[in-house]
């Protein structure tokens, strides 16, 4: 069940409603259940969700909000509603509510009349069923949505140059110490084109390490992919200036490419990995 509350001027957390507009367009059995002996059952009212919307030709913003009624105060010919919106549920356009009208048991006339009704349908199930989801469908490569994430896999994005070999070895050693495995795209060959291997590696990894040293465009591209599909990304670089402006707000690790510098890198990255694995 849910409350349907429609107002000409919209809703702003505390509003007055004429008493004779309460439980219009509501089945008699529901009215008796919520208003036994003519007295409103406050506890029952607060237990079910409410859909607050503006009249479709009214002055209010043409979006509905989902929330709950805290209290109903009788003021003679009017009642005062105290309520709140669920911040975790975004506003829903009136147009979308109209499209779901039959499922929500809303009569067409209700969209143009200020009133309070109770509907004997599952509001959340219907909203979830009709929620428009945007699916990521890249054109240059494919994301295998059915491939499981390997919780022990760390992938490393860096230029394929000999100067990075010892850096990669350092990351492999620290991964072994954490009982994890570390791979770079040149460690695998599963697809005809290398970009697909890289994307597949990023997609199934628990954490992605991106070495921005030298401002390599491929690494930036790969970091963007990892961020887009929601991966935890650790940025590293030999020079702070190699971290581009758009990524400066994200914490990163700088290191020197010598024995001591790589040891410090391993320590800092290891701490970050352990923190991420606890999420």
Image (spheres, rainbow, N blue to C red):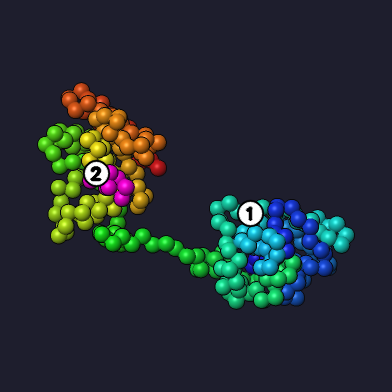
Extreme residue toward the top, this view: 260
How many residues crowd mark 1 within 10 Å: few (<14), some (14–19), many (20+)?
many
State whether the magenta stretch is mostly helix, strand or loop: helix
Placement of the C terminus among the 4 image quadrants: top left
Secondary structure of the residue carrying tag 2 is helix
How many residues crowd mark 2 within 10 Å: few (<14), some (14–19), many (20+)?
few
Q: Residue at x 72, y 60 (%)?
A: 9
Q: Is residue 129 magenta?
A: no
From the top left corner, tell me how far across and down residue 137 is, in percent. 33, 62
Camera-side residue: 231 or 56? 56
Is residue 119 in sight in this rendering? Answer: yes
Camera-side residue: 151 or 218? 218
From the top left corner, tell me how far across and down residue 38 is, in percent. 83, 67
User: Which disc is residue 104 wearing?
Assistant: none
**Circle 2 residue:** 217
Q: Residue at x 51, y 68 (%)?
A: 130
Is residue 46 in sight in this rendering? Answer: no
From the top left corner, tell me how far across and down residue 37 is, in percent. 83, 68
Residue 167 vertical position relative to residue 28 in the rendered view, above or below: above
From the top left corner, tell me how far across and down residue 174 is, in percent. 23, 34
**Circle 1 residue:** 85
Q: Residue at x 71, y 71 (%)?
A: 112
The magenta segment is 218-225
Tell me the distance, in whole angstroms, between the alpha carbons under discs 1 and 2: 45 Å
């Amino acid at each position: 069940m849910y409350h349907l509350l429609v107002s000409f001027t919209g809703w702003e957390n505390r509003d007055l409603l004429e008493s004779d507009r309460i439980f219009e367009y509501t089945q008699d059995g529901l009215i008796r259940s919520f208003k036994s002996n003519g007295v409103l059952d406050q506890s029952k009212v607060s237990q079910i969700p409410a859909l607050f919307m503006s009249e479709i030709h009214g002055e209010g913003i043409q979006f509905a909000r989902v929330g709950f009624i805290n209290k109903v105060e009788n003021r003679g010919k009017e009642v005062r509603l105290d309520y709140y919106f669920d911040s975790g549920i975004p506003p829903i356009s009136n147009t979308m509510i109209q499209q779901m009208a039959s499922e929500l048991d809303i009569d067409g006339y209700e969209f143009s009349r200020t009133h309070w009704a109770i509907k004997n349908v599952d509001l959340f199930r219907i909203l979830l069923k009709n929620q428009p989801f945007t699916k990521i469908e890249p054109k240059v490569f494919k994301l295998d949505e059915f491939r499981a994430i390997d919780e022990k896999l760390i992938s490393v994005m860096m230029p394929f140059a000999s100067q990075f070999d010892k850096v990669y070895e350092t990351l492999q050693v620290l991964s072994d110490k954490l009982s994890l495995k570390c791979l770079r795209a040149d460690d695998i060959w599963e697809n005809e084109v290398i970009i697909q291997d890289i994307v597949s590696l990023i997609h199934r990894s628990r954490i992605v390490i991106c070495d921005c040293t030298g401002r390599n465009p491929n690494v930036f591209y790969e970091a963007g992919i990892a961020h887009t599909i929601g991966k935890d990304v650790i940025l590293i670089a030999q020079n702070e200036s190699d971290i581009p402006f758009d990524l400066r707000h994200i914490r990163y690790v700088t290191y020197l490419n010598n024995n001591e510098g790589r040891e410090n890198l391993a320590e800092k990255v290891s701490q970050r990995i352990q923190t991420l694995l606890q999420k």
